[in-house]
Image (cartoon, helix red, strand yellow):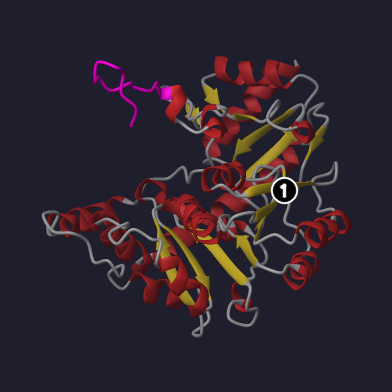
Amino acid sequence: MRCQPNGEVMKKSVQQLVRDEVQSISAYPVADATGYIKLDAMENPWPLPEELRHRLAGLLADVAINRYPDPAGGGIQQQLKQVFAIPEQAEVILGNGSDELITLITQALARPGAKLLALEPSFVMYRLNASFSGMQYIGVPLQADFSLNLTATLAAIAEHQPAVVFVSYPNNPTGPRFARAEVAAICEAAPGLVVVDEAYQAFASDSFMNMVGKLDNLLVMRTLSKLGLAGIRLGYAAASSQWINELNKVRPPYNINVLTQAVASFALQNIAVFEQQAAELCRERSRLFAALANYPIVQVFPSEANFITIRVNDAVALYQHFKNQQILVKKLDGSHPLLAGCLRLTVGAPHENDAVLAALNTYFA
């Protein structure tokens, strides 16, 4: 602490105290969706059925909100293992959304000089958490069609020897799922941890969960958000006990609150409701994908998630047209060179998807 000659403390400004890499970025943007059909955040469009809402209300009334939550998660890990066929030899860690799990992973691995490698474009929180934790970020561009450039990825792994590789499977914000053999090749080549982020697994045709415990450097990360529980912020990851034991050392002791624990346990007991909704969204995704081909859109990218990414000649104009029609979608244009001209459309309920198609009718009329 420095003092002036008169003994007064010399106060430093915010700019002098906050790290340069933090000052250089913007906060994660979340658009105000008030009054809009909200199709920008990959949420399940349906609330709980009324009968389940009444039962849940009674359950929550008895939750001891005056007490700290069970630091071990209230048995949710075992429920997750049973419901989602997580291998018995795997251990599970819970996070306040998958965002917190990414933070825990980067904090635990941020040795001096450690590197994080991810594909681009992909979930922006990989890069941001590398910066927050002081890791060097290595981005490997996808192909123009958003497929994985395996040759470039393996070369980058060999050159940089990353402590962790993040693979979004299927990929957000583009939609396609990379070939399983390609991801397996990344696991084999990586000298460190490989995180396969399966946030959209409920809508996809494949998963690496069955390999957890068989591949020592594999961690599979998921979330309950896309299933219809975005509001409770519960993510989970499965890996060998050796990895989970170390990650638990940096996990806050009460990171999953009592209301989240209660709702998650209740939802897992009624998982069939959410699985039916996911199946309906997959049918709507197919309908929306087929309908989009009827418009003069430059490109409609295949998707195994609950959204579809499109490329148009003027993404800004179409984005604004959607807003004028009270529909909020995600403008990807400008966020990465490969996303030029792109918008991301969350697959909504049938009437919401009809509204999207009606808006496109007026735009292209």
Q: How far across and how far down the image is residue 339, in percent?
A: 75, 33
Magenta stretch in the rendered image: 1-14
**Residue located farthest toward the front when viewing the structure as drawn:** 5
**Quadrant of image for the C terminus:** top right
Asked whether the viewer can see residue 176, the reply is: yes
In which quadrant of the rendered view does residue 257 lie?
A: bottom left
| Between 198 and 227, the one nearer to me in the picture | 198
123 versus 298 height, above or below: below
Which amino acid does the dot numbered 1 rest on? Ile
**Quadrant of image for the N terminus:** top left
| Between 251 and 195, the one nearer to me in the picture | 251
Q: Main secondary structure of the magenta part?
A: loop
| Between 52 and 307, the one nearer to me in the picture | 307
Q: Is residue 190 left or right of residue 124?
A: right
Q: How far across and how far down the image is residue 84, in percent?
A: 49, 72
| Residue at 51% over, 78% down | 242
Q: Is residue 233 left or right of residue 202?
A: left
